Amino acid sequence: MRAFFSRLQPSYISRDDLVMSLRITLWNEFLHEQHDPAVKAIYPNGIHDTLAEAIRQQIPTAHIHTATLDQPDHGLPDDLLDQTDVLAWWGHKAHNQVRDDIVEKIHARILNGMGALFLHSAHFAKPFKKLMGTSCRIHWREAAEPERLFIVHPAHPIADGLPTHIDISHEEMYGEFFDIPTPDELIMLSWFQGGNVFRSCCTWTRGKGKIVYFRPGHETHPTYHKPEIQRIICNALRWAAPTSNSPYTSRATHEPQPLSPFPH
């Protein structure tokens, strides 16, 4: 088996061990950065590279692998997915180019415990839509308007170390209604200068997998260079990592024998 990370470890690990050995795969379309000079100027080596560097600074013991759309299997072969604790996903204009068989594998891994962080326009990515079971449609506007990101669940681990709100000087507007299932937890709510609001940081569980959606991060703005945004992403990666050792399978299990009766 090809070793993508520096060492193997069990799929489910203790929180203390997790801090020392979190295995992260950052997936990025990596198209805007190659074809749009304005985006390349902000993210010269890709959004995934900027995020990888931020994670190295905040979680220095993490094992980080990056993958892009144009690689074989979109950079996500089975052995890499099997060794990934949390998959972060950024996509925008090529959602339909992601192969359905890869989506099925990602979905199965999440149900069986891999965490997932979907960023910005990944609300419309195939894996996210499959997990949500809804259209995931939004209202949107590209006006480079100011955004205020309110922390509405300050006790949540994803909000650790953050102020009461974060101001972003220029961002793309995403507005309600956001067609998603009611989140298990709503962590952050955005207000935009144009008057719209949006549920910008939400969590769910599917099977054993923990899922985060985090909205800020339009490619034409340097949002991912902002320290507070980097802190949120690192917190979300830590939170979404698998820690449960309880038995679970995403497949139906035939039990031909009845359970042992209680002793009299």
Image: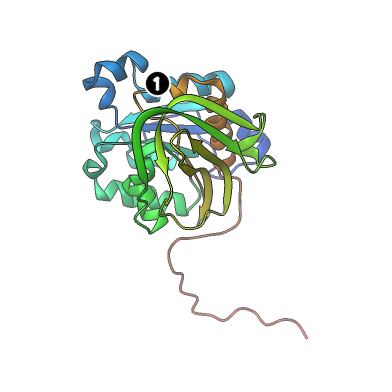
Counting from the top left corner in percent of width and height, residue 135 is at: 34, 55
Residue position for label 1: 49
| Image x and y of residue 24, in percent | 47, 32
| Residue at (37% x, 58% y) in the render | 134
**Among all residues in the image, which is located at the extreme bottom?**
264
Query: Quick check: 50 left or right of 156?
Result: left
Residue at 40% of width from left, 36% of height from top? 173
> Which colour style is shown?
rainbow
On the picture, is 86 further left or further right than 141? right
Which residue in the rendered view is the most extreme toward the front?
194
Q: Residue drawn 75% across and 82% down?
A: 263
| Residue 53 makes an appearance in the image | yes
| Quarter of the figure with the N terminus | top left
Query: Quarter of the image holding residue 196?
Result: top left
Tell me: residue 146, above or below residue 38.
below
- Give the class, few, some or many, for how many residues have Cα within 10 Å of label 1's Cα (few <14, many ≥20): some
Is residue 243 shown above or below 228? Answer: below
Viewer-closest of 20 and 92: 92
Query: In the shown orientation, is residue 146 left or right of residue 27?
Result: right
Q: Nearer the viewer, residue 161 or 110?
A: 161
How many numbered marks have been drawn onto this rendered protein structure? 1
Secondary structure beneath dot 1 equals: helix
- 68 versus 244 height, above or below: above
Residue 84 seen: no
The location of residue 192, given as percent across then percent down, is 47, 35
Where residue 29 sits: x, y (%)?
Answer: 29, 32
Quarter holding the C terminus is bottom right
Q: What residue type is labelled 1?
A: Asp
